[in-house]
Amino acid sequence: MDLNVEIKNLGKVAHARVSIRPLTVITGCNSSGKSFITRGLYSILHTLNQDVVSAYILNVLSLTNSALLRLSDGIPRRSADDDALLSDIGLLLEGVRQSVADRLSPSPLYQPPASQLVLNDLKTAVAELARRLKVGKGTKMQAVKQHYTDIEDYLSDLEFCLSGDVGFYTEAVGRALHSAFSGNFQVADIKRLLSSDSANFSLGDGTEVSIGDKGLGFKLSETMLGSLQSLKNVVYLESPVYYKMRNALKDARLFRLNMLRRGAVNPVPQYFYDLDEMLEAELPPVNEVFGQIADKVEALINGRLAVTPSGEIVYSERGRQSVPLNMASSGISNIGMIALLLRRNVLDEGSFLFIDEPEMNLHTSWQHAMLDILLDLSRAGVNVVVATHSLDMLHRLEAKVEADASLLGSVGVCRLSSDGISLEDGSVLGGLRAAKEALGAPYLEVIEERLP
């Protein structure tokens, strides 16, 4: 998937144009805005790739079911007829939930699931429950009035959700985008990301996301949204440290939920939890092409990463016992995660992979191998976006492009100045050579200082 993206006034990024190609390299000095681009694009693409409407509806259904359980437990002198009606309501709730869970809409825009009739039956049953609870002096209703009111509110919300009103779709996407920017940049107030009055992402075809004083706004085209929703998965891979502490971070997230509700910021970025959910999913087996790429990685690290039934990631070196990932080297963790994502079928044709500083903790030879693997992924149909300042990886990529002219159309280079402005180089090779020159300048200075 090719995109021509323009970003203005987001954090360190003043004005950048990024040509997203099968393999896209974003480079520049420290604090030039590389991660603002990758995190921002990930926040948008991952959100628009999700069925945010169904996710919201399922959450409301869960809240409704919890309120129903509290109401059921709170009814004094509950009769057999009460139990039967409560059971019917529970079954109707499950019917709506199943309808939403099974929805596979062919349309890129919001389509309400075929559950409106079930919702009508549910509302009728809840109204009948209210009538019964009010019989006599109404003491039963008085005991559970708040829980009943909660259920009515949730059903009203569900009716709006399932009505097909485009306004609800807009609200759901807006909430999801706001949450993604907040979680991935780890800020409670996304206006802190602004370097001017407003920030803007343009993805082409009339699709834009903006952040300003009034919050987050967006415009979507059906064509662009259809393309983004057709993507297999959108993945952000950064520090292997998070995956060395995977179970501890998952537990910490649960313990911190109360603080998060009060506006605290989770110290772990949302993209870690997004990927963690994909690792837990039961996906089809990896196909032959991606299996061969995984084989190449595993030959390099002389073993493989795997997820145990308890959810722990371990490194199994050939001929040795498996050890927890936190006992493996950071280099093995870094490059081995690629193979794990392939084995778990998280990365497949039509996926998007954002990878920040893939050279981290890698020896020069492994940096070259990492570049080759990322190229293999891009050739196999994964869109790869790399933020790097590795001179070795750029040398390798330049050599690959020079040797294979077909890569000129499938590699994009965005070179950022220290002011967060993308620099125009005229060609892929021109961009790579200019980036190499900038990264190699300190070496030249050392050599010049040593000259007589």
Image (cartoon, helix red, strand yellow):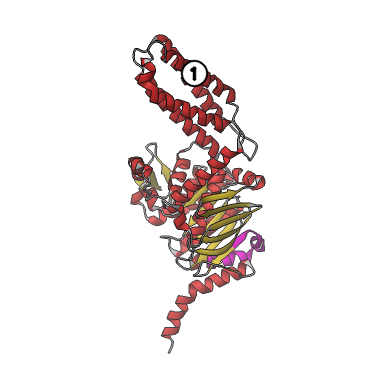
Tell me the kind of residue under disc 1: Ala
Q: Is residue 104 visible?
A: yes
Q: Is residue 294 visible?
A: no
Main SS of the magenta part reads helix
Residue at the spot 37% in from the left edge and 37% down from the top edge: 310
Estimate the x, y position of residue 25 in percent, counting from the top left: 55, 61
Instruction: Please identify the quarter of the rendering in which residue 136 is found.
Output: top left
* Residue at the bottom extreme of this rendering: 452
- Identify residue for label 1: 127
Vertical placement of residue 330 versus 50, above or below: below
Check if residue 400 falls in the magenta segment: yes
Check if residue 410 falls in the magenta segment: yes
Depth check, front residue: 432 or 58: 58
SS under mark 1: helix
Vertical placement of residue 350 versus 436, above or below: above
Estimate the x, y position of residue 15 in percent, counting from the top left: 56, 64
Instruction: Please identify the quarter of the rendering in which residue 306 is found.
Output: top left
Residue at the spot 65% in from the left edge and 38% down from the top edge: 107
Check disc 1: other Cα within 10 Å, few if <14, some if 14-19, many if 20+. Answer: some
Bounds of the magenta span?
394-412
Estimate the x, y position of residue 213 in percent, counting from the top left: 50, 55
Estimate the x, y position of residue 158 in percent, counting from the top left: 52, 30
Quadrant holding the C terminus: bottom left
Total number of numbered labels?
1
* Residue at the front extreme of this rendering: 137
Residue at the spot 53% in from the left edge and 71% down from the top edge: 436
